[in-house]
Amino acid sequence: MKNSTVTYSDHRHTRVRLQSEKLSAHSGSASDLTHQEDMKILSAAVENLLACTGFKGRARRNCSDYRLERNDVYLPNLPAAFEGYTILHLSDLHSDGLIDEGEGIMRIVETVPSDLAVLTGDFSFEDNVNHFEPCLEALVPIVRSISARDGIFGILGNHDLLEMVPALERMGVQMLLNDAAYLKRGSAIIVLAGVDDPHFYKCHDLQRALSVATPEQFVILLSHSPEIAEEASRSGVDFYLCGHTHGGQICLPGGVPVFANTSCQRRYLSGGWHCGTMQGYTSRGTGFSLAAARLFCPPEITLHTLHSVSMPCEFYTTAEENKGSWYSNFSGHAVFA
Ligand SMILES: [Fe+2]
C-alpha cells in the first residue's frame, strides 16, 4: 500500500478554500475577476460569430444530436471473469444547461443496460454555489434512466462543488473523491478508483485513490480530464476514463477543435488513446458549456466493452501514430456533425 502525504481532511479543506476563492471572483469581491468575465465575453463572442457565419441554428441543434459510441477496448491484464464487461460512460452533462432537459440522453441510456455506469464530472453548467440546485434537479431523471448492475460511480469536475456530493449520493451516484471501490465477479476483482478534478482545482490525489490496489490488480481510473494520464500510467493504472475537453465542442470539419481548454497533448482530446501500457478514453462530453453550440463534434454517450484479450492488429495504433489522429478513436468512429 502506498503512503499519501495529503489526508482526506486536507483535501476537503483545500477544495473548499479554492471554491471560495473562485466564488469570490465570481461575485466581484476579489481582484482576479478575469476568469468569469472572460468566460461571459467568450460565450457572447462565440454566439455572435456563429450568428454572423450562419451556423448558430445548426450548432444549437447539434447539442441534442446525441451519439451512442461503442468502444471495444482490449486489455491484456483484464481478469477473464470480466470478459465482455460493459461500462456506460457519461461525462460533462452540464445538466442545467441541456436544451432538451436531457430527454434525448434518457432515450438512449434507457436502451443500454450495462454492468457499470460512470459519470466523469462536470454535472453543472453554472459553477456558482447559488445555482447548483437546478443542476441536481435536472440530473435526477437522467440518473434514474441508468440501469447498471454494479452501480453508478462519479467524480467531480471543475464546474462542480464539493457541496453537491451528498445530493449526488442520495441520487444513487457513489462519488469517488480520491477513493476507490471494488468490482467483483466471483473471486476476480477490479479496482475502480476516482480522483477529484485535476484541471482547475488540482485536488486530485492519485496515490491516495490507488492506495488500496495491489500491483497485480487491474485498475480503472476515473479522472475528470486527461491531464494526469502520464502520472496514472506510471502508477499502474490499466484503463483511464475521462472527459472535460468536449472534444473541442466547436470544431473544424474532421473534428479539429478551435478551443481545447486543456494543457495536455492533442492525442488525449477525444476518443481512445494509450499512454505506455495504459489505455484510455476521453469522452467528447454529453452536454456542452460556454455556449449552446457544437460543430463537427456531436455529444456522446459511450458504451465501453472490455475484452480480456490482446487488441486485434487492425485496431492497434502506436502512441506516435495516435498523435496525428487524435480526433478518431479505436472504434473508428468518424467525428462529424
Ligand atoms: Fe471540465
Image (cartoon, rainbow, N blue to C red):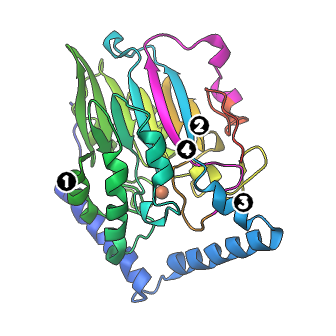
Q: CA distance from mark 4 to mark 1?
A: 26 Å
Q: Which mark is residue 20?
A: none
Q: Which of labels 3 and 1 is toward the front? A: 3
Q: Which three-letter amino acid code belongs to the residue tagged 4? A: Glu
Q: CA distance from mark 3 to mark 4?
A: 17 Å
Indicate which disc, 3 or 1, sits on the residue closer to the N terminus: 3
Q: Which of labels 4 and 2 is toward the front? A: 4
> Label 2 belongs to which residue?
271
> Label 3 belongs to which residue?
58
Identify the secondary structure beneath mark 3.
helix
Q: CA distance from mark 2 to mark 3?
A: 23 Å
Indicate which disc, 4 or 1, sits on the residue closer to the N terminus: 1
Q: Which quarter of the picture shows residue 334?
A: top right
Q: CA distance from mark 4 to mark 2?
A: 10 Å
Q: CA distance from mark 1 to mark 2?
A: 31 Å
Estimate the x, y position of residue 39 in percent, counting from the top left.
57, 74
Q: Which three-letter amino acid code belongs to the residue tagged 2? A: Gly
> Label 1 belongs to which residue?
170
In depth, the one of 99 and 242 nearer the eye is: 99
Q: Which of labels 1 and 2 is toward the front? A: 1
Mark 1 Cα-neighbour bin, 10 Å: few <14, some 14–19, many ≥20 = few
Q: Which mark is residue 300?
A: 4
Q: Which three-letter amino acid code belongs to the residue tagged 3? A: Arg
Residue found 47% across the figure and 29% down from its top: 304
Identify the secondary structure beneath mark 1.
helix
Mark 2 Cα-neighbour bin, 10 Å: few <14, some 14–19, many ≥20 = many
Relative height, residue 166 to residue 54 (above, below): above
Identify the secondary structure beneath mark 4.
strand
Q: Which of labels 3 and 4 is toward the front? A: 3
Indicate which disc, 4 or 2, sits on the residue closer to the N terminus: 2
Q: Which residues are magenta?
A: 293-321
